[in-house]
Image (tube, grey):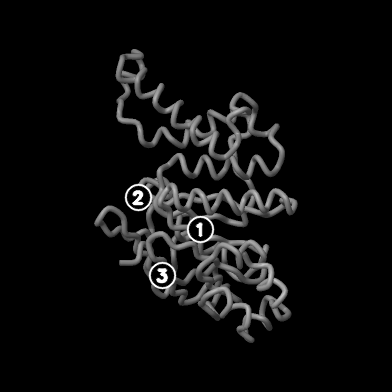
Amino acid sequence: MPILTINNLTKTFGGLTAISNVNMELEPGELVGLIGPNGAGKTTVFNLLTGMYEPSAGTITFFRDDREVALQGLKPYTVCKAGVARTFQNIRLFKDLSVLDNVRIAMHKNVSYGLLPSFLHLKTYREAEKKLIEDSMELLRILKLDHKKDEYARNLPYGEQRHLEIARALATNPSLLLLDEPAAGMNPAETIQLTEIIRWIRVNFHLTILLIEHDMSLVMKICERIYVLDYGVVIANGTPDEIKTNKRVIEAYLGEDMTNVRDQKS
């Protein structure tokens, strides 16, 4: 059963249709790309999936732990609780908090103690907080940020801020991770490192990943399937090799034969 099914998803803003009758499916464990020109509606899809927008029409069905959840119309915190996490195209960290606290805040959705143990610092609170810090530090270690745990998030270099966003998303214990242009602003070395991190967390965290990205080298290397949006409509869906040779996609977005990118694929 697909972990995510999108049926005829449509979003209009007044007289403007941002996306129209979008249909997508993601199988558990897949790494799927969502590409298209600027303004094609990619981030609108993410905003609909995460409850930031309500759809004008259509359904979003998420499947986790043998339970189906209709995501359309839910609040962002409810979507997160259901098991969907995201990063943002424009980084949205708690920049005046430490690196560690950025992750701890996200992980607090999973704590089991109540208000009274927290207020009185009872044993259940102390034990839970100790475990929370240990788990947060493990995520920072994976994202190579553990040595900067006490730094303010705003003082991190750009690439490390991207990594911290991913760590914070992972702290919510998702099944589905949405990455909105994670390589934006990165240099080639940082992008290579990010590629390996995405591959690693997908396997070791048992994630399904939907990725928006303009770096076609990254997309073609790690995505098993790709959806292509143009003017809010899905114009293609297939493997990287199928997408690279699709004439409609080349005309709408790629702009040229992607043979050189195919040859770089590892």
- The residue drawn where x is 44% and y is 61% is 54
- The residue drawn where x is 46% and y is 72% is 10
Placement of 145 over or under 78, stated as above or below: above
Whole-Å distance between the Cαs marked 3 and 1? 17 Å
Placement of 37 over or under 168, stated as above or below: below
The numbered mark at residue 25 is 3
Q: Which residue is mark 1?
A: 47
Q: Measuring from the top left, give residue 79's x and y in whole percent.
A: 39, 51
Placement of 138 over or under 250, stated as above or below: above
Q: Measuring from the top left, give residue 138's x and y in whole percent.
A: 49, 33
Mark 2: which amino acid?
A: Ala
> Which quadrant of the rendered structure holds the N terminus?
bottom left
Q: Earlier in the sequence, mark 3 or mark 1?
A: 3
- The residue drawn where x is 53% and y is 54% is 199
**Callout 3 secondary element:** strand
**Callout 1 secondary element:** helix
Front label number (3 vs 1): 3
Q: Measuring from the top left, give residue 112's x and y in whole percent.
A: 30, 30
Using a 10 Å C-alpha cutoff, classify the residue at mark 3 as few (fewer than 14 neighbours), some (14 to 19) or many (20 or more). some
Discs 2, 3 touching: Cβ within 8 Å: no
